[in-house]
Image: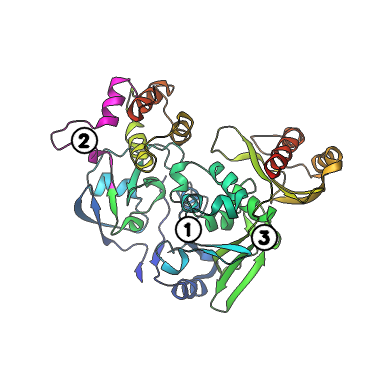
Amino acid sequence: MRRVNKDEKSRISLTLNGRKMAAEAEPRMLLSDFLRHSLGATGTHVGCEHGVCGCCTVQIDGTAVRSCLTLAMQAEGRDVKTVESLAGPNGRLNTLQQAFQKHHALQCGFCTPGILMSFTDFLSRNPKPTEEELREVLSGHICRCTGYAGIMAALKEAVGIS
Amino acid sequence: MKPRPFDYARPDTIDEAVALLAERGDEARILAGGQSLMAMMNLRLADPSMLIDIARIAELGHIRDLGDTIEVGAAVTQNRLLAWPDLTAKLPLLAAALPFVGHFQTRNKGTVCGSIAHADPSSEIPLSLATLEGSVVLRSTGGERVVAAKDFQIDMMTTARRGDEMITAVRFPVHTGRGVAFREVARRHGDFAIIAIAAVIEGKDFAQIGIGGMAGKPLVQRIVMKELKSEIEALATGFEDYEDLHASAALRRDILRNLAPLVLAEAQACAA
């Protein structure tokens, strides 16, 4: 059994975007803060911090989850992927990112990392979704700039809905 | 915000988990998916002194066909149940209700049993369990007991679970071949329902209807289809005034009057 007292820091290891990483944290450390402050992966954004806005969405073992509703301890030993994992080694954007750029699917870009991580999971399980299914998944994110039209256009292009 | 400090334990077995509960009692909370609990802790609405993380306990990860019932272990996420190949055949009401639970992203982590333990009055999974007259399996160091859904959820976020007990599984009765429907009215898809209605057709003349959002717990009633209109009116006027910032009692009654016939018609069409 793994057991850590509240004021005690323990070493938490996980795989972040294919690299083994570790840092010390107390049990109360949220995964969102652990990624940003302890591991320096600031691509993940923190919005509402109670699971509603979706900005902090990352993947744990390939599954899109809210990192603000996840303790760093819960991700211990797991394979965590953040938005930094999407572009190629030369910085070349992937298909989904290119579609977002083309259709102006972001203005301030604060919500974008979470949306990309959600759809990277969803589309890997369901590569030919309907427009309604895309909307359903997008409803788990709040964007205050775009009115969602650009995001829907980008998603539709990425999955081949004309 | 961030949660207040707490001790963290990640037991490997149910026995270790209930031993911790026996030691810490009400001060400890079980952490499975955390999609309600972590939000409440971040908002400082919950302040446990210990979290017992059961998500990796292998013996809680099962979806088991027991013949008359389907047993879902406490570590099974909502999306895992939704993707279970036999769901539509064996538990069609759950197949209809689960897509309304939160969002894709929260269903990826939120558990079926966690939703039952949380016991939100407008929540879809407790409503489905109550409508189907399922049961909850509880374990403590003293042993196991099985509690019927109607006796489990007592009121808003209040259940019959004792401080030293944890839910290890829930059991949904198989309802193959019966017409079902589930609908809800919310401000936004995925938000908390103002009114949620589940219906299961029982033979030619009866239907079991479950209503969430009209009281502190799901209300379940068997109704005579021939008397549909008066039965729904009796349900709408019979409830005590239950209201919050999102909807007055009068609005809830109106939604019930208008939504219930649609859900029952849909269930009948699905039975035919």
Local SS, label 3: helix
- What segment is highlighted magenta in the picture? A81-105
Q: Residue at x 40, y 70 (%)?
A: B11
Quarter of the picture containing the N terminus of chain A is bottom left
Q: Residue at x 69, y 38 (%)?
A: B266
**Rendered view: A92 above or below A29:** above
**Chain designation of label 3:** B
**Rendered view: B147 above or below B85:** below
Residue B29 horizontal/vertical position (percent): 50, 62
Res B149 label: 3
Q: Nearer the viewer, residue B156 or B197?
A: B197
Q: Is residue B118 magenta?
A: no
Local SS, label 2: loop
Question: Callout 1: few (<14), some (14-19), or many (20+) C-alpha neighbours within 10 Å?
Answer: many
Q: Amino acid at mark 1?
A: Val
C-alpha distance separating marks 1 and 3: 19 Å
Q: Are marks 2 and 1 in contact (CB under 8 Å)?
A: no
C-alpha distance separating marks 2 and 3: 49 Å
Q: Is residue B201 visible?
A: yes
Quarter of the picture containing the C terminus of chain A is top left
Q: Amino acid at mark 2?
A: Ala
Q: Quadrant of residue B33?
A: bottom left
